[in-house]
Image: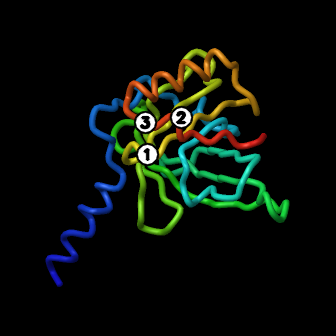
Amino acid sequence: MKTIILIIPILLMACAGTPKGLEPVTGFDATRYTGKWYEIARLKNIFEDGLDHITAEYNLNNDGGLNVTNSGRNIETGVREYAYGKAFFKESPDIGSLKVSFFGPFYGGYHIIELDKDKYRYVMIAGSDRSYLWILAREPTLDEAVLKRLIARADQLGFKTEELIYPAQ
């Protein structure tokens, strides 16, 4: 039993780890990151199956982390669904590497690997491994040239970009 208790924290931290070969952005500013983001593209995940018009909203929390509200419209019912979570910086707040939880003590990785540092208009996020990828933007659409560049970069980094999903906004 003692072994299991010792292994659980290690497994939970591994779930929030940065995929090998990926570097989170530096010079990150959480205050500028707050607000609403629209999902432009993603790799398939069970959390967003059957949803479109997907957004993520981030707000600063008093404990130094971020409150997260993800939402999307259920394609079948038309009803908006919500998920609430918290994110905490894994290292320094100026490094875009966080652990995020929507399910109590269980955390996943949230690693910002591309960011428009000038105006915070778009971002590309990796999860704990290369099966999780999101491209978000401040507007419901993203300039085609920027999107192509981000997809090419994701492909270079080993993501299965041919499997990207582009939800309706």
Quadrant assignment for the N terminus: bottom left
Q: Which residue extends farthest front?
A: 162
For discs 1 and 2, the disc positioned in front in the rendered view: 1
Which residue corresponds to the image point at 33% horizontal and 40% vertical from the top-left?
Answer: 91
The residue that disc 1 covers is 127
Q: Earlier in the sequence, mark 1 or mark 3?
A: 1
- What secondary structure is marked by label 2? helix
Residue 20: image location, x then y, percent: 27, 38
Left or right: 17 in relation to 82: left
How far apart marks 1 and 3 lie (CA) works out to: 11 Å
Viewer-proximal residue among 39 and 107: 39
Name which residue type carries label 1.
Answer: Gly
Q: Which of marks 3 and 2 is nearer the N terminus?
A: 2
Which residue corresponds to the image point at 49% horizontal and 37% vertical from the top-left?
Answer: 125
Viewer-proximal residue among 94 and 130: 130
How far apart marks 1 and 2 lie (CA) works out to: 18 Å
For discs 3 and 2, the disc positioned in front in the rendered view: 3
Which residue corresponds to the image point at 32% horizontal and 41% vertical from the top-left?
Answer: 19
Which residue corresponds to the image point at 41% horizontal and 48% vertical from the top-left?
Answer: 109
Residue 22: image location, x then y, percent: 33, 32
Viewer-proximal residue among 68 and 130: 130
Residue 73: image location, x then y, percent: 78, 55
Observer able to see residue 35: no
Observer able to see residue 149: yes
Name which residue type carries label 2.
Answer: Ala
Name which residue type carries label 3.
Answer: Phe
The residue that disc 2 covers is 30
- What secondary structure is marked by label 1? loop
